[in-house]
Amino acid sequence: MTPDHEIAIIGGGFSGIGAAILLQKAGFGDFLMLEEGDGVGGAWHWNTYPGVAVDIPSFSYQFSFEQISGWSRVYAPGRELKAYADYCVDKYDIRRRTRLGSKVVSATFDDEKHLWRLETADGWSMTARFVVGATGVLTQPKPPDIDGLAGFRGTVMHTARWDHGVDLRGKRVAVVGTGASAVQVIPSIAPEAGRLTVFQRTPIWCLPKPDVALPDPVRLALRRLPGAKRLSRLASQALVELTFPLAAHFHNLLPTAGAGERIGHAHLRRAVKDPETREKLTPRYALGCKRPSFSNEYLQTFNRENVVLETTGIDTITESGVRTADGTEHPVDVLVLATGFKVFEKGNMPAFTVRGADGVDLEKFWEENRFQAYQGVSVPGFPNLFTILGPYGYNGSSYFNLIETQTAHIVRCLRNARKTGATRVEVTNEANDRYFRSMLDRRKHQVFFQDSCSLANSYYFDVNGDVPFRASPTLETMVTSRFFDLDDYAFADAR
């Protein structure tokens, strides 16, 4: 049976866009990209809250093959990332191979025909020989599990679904959560709100942000001077590598492991005037246990007279406010949920029902065997299925490094399938087990498994206490994606 398309790409964020471009460059042009939303860009399409921006330098947060010089700042605002997504889709003629408004709800593998059948929420279906899962992880908002939320009579919105029609001027606003999104949105809305109450469960490590506007002469230099883009990207990549992949995965081996914490403590002392507030904002866990943030405004916001930091746990949401465990009720007009996303949870890993060979359910497989995937790309028992952001795929560097690295792995598999006439490509159990053991063996050096991380309330940890990050420097991920042993996969045809 000939499928409708050779490849289906699920997700129209940068993972899907990058996969589509690189597959096309490699000669695989028969694909369809399916996107749930009404536009491309993924997180940068959905997240439009005030202050939204990248949290690594823009020189790293772009494709290596499509570097631009027009960023307005070192850390570009979200609208520029959304525009970059649209630019890439149009430049590489991906839009005509994209179906918007198509939320995939199930994928089922046909053992006999060696193809996948995809079903969408609106009842449409298609078949594809191969599937590339590019749904990302920061896509499905996670509402808090707090009693009374449904009965609140004011306005409620999640940062990932911001309602720009809501006027915050003079309003009593409450923000629940102090993660990466909250760090950006809180200083952006504080000047508007009449009173802003921030409900914090766990303080976040906040480091100074080396962010400045890029004036026209600098952008002109990036565009005209030979090697300028390459040099700026190299410097940016080095900064990113030092601050997460190396610091997190080789924590016990680095003599400078405490340097970041010293910088964070100094930043906090300089930024916050009140000693009591400063104490509440001081993390009690090691830097890296959960996602840190970079900001030159967040901590200073708590010096404002109209901003209150509340660290007493929330008991319930009432019709008109938030009641904490000590019985205090905080009147609220607008409730902002900065509570993050479903990451390593049911309903997001995987983001839709996936049934592989012999009808095995992927969610159940991971539930019974722990999250695992060979180089974060393939899972045994799920032929012809590849993921960009699978377990133990992302090492903490730029997502764009991940997209290019994982797609290189996928292209290598597809090229060999085309060369040998194979219609079924499946990673072997032996290869997957070997890779999984290698990741677990490296845990002893990672920051995540320090004792203090138990205090972090970090989404990095799954239900098994694992942190399914790839414990590798970026260079290793780039090399292994291009030179892994093809015998780690079984290639077969339908005859």
Image (cartoon, rainbow, N blue to C red):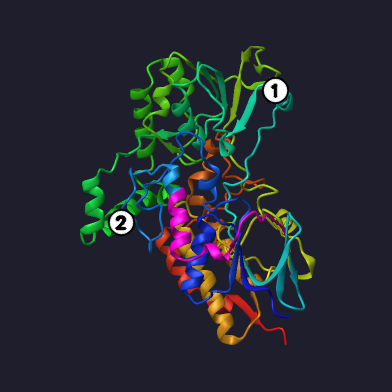
Q: Is residue 72 above or below residue 385?
A: above
Residue 83 inside the magenta-drawn segment: yes
Q: Measuring 46% from the left and 38% from the top, which residue is drawn there?
A: 52
In the picture, the disc for residue 234 is: 2
Amino acid at dot 2: Leu
In the picture, the disc for residue 270 is: none
Q: Is residue 214 left or right of residue 114?
A: left
Q: Is residue 66 left or right of residue 174?
A: left
For residue 453, what is the image quadrant?
top right
Q: CA distance from mark 1 to mark 2?
A: 49 Å
Residue closest to the eye, 450 or 487: 487
Q: Say which quadrant the N terminus sits in.
A: bottom right
Q: Which residues are magenta?
A: 82-107
**Number of other residues with Cα within 10 Å of mark 2, as a class: few under 14, some 14 to 19, many 20 or more:** some
For residue 433, what is the image quadrant?
bottom right
In percent of width and height, residue 265 lies at: 38, 29
Q: Is residue 236 visible?
A: yes
Callout 2 secondary element:
helix
Residue closest to the eye, 65 or 36: 36
Sequence-wise first label, 1 or 2: 1
In percent of width and height, residue 141 lies at: 62, 41
Q: Is residue 361 left or right of residue 264?
A: right
Amino acid at dot 1: Phe
Q: On the image, numbered disc 1 is attached to which residue?
A: 152
Q: Say which quadrant the C terminus sits in.
A: bottom right
In percent of width and height, residue 403 lies at: 49, 60
Q: Is residue 20 above or below residue 45?
A: below
Q: Is residue 384 visible?
A: no
Callout 1 secondary element:
loop
Residue 431 inside the magenta-drawn segment: no
Q: Measuring 53% from the left and 62% from the top, which residue is drawn there?
A: 95
Q: Is residue 377 above or below residue 302?
A: below
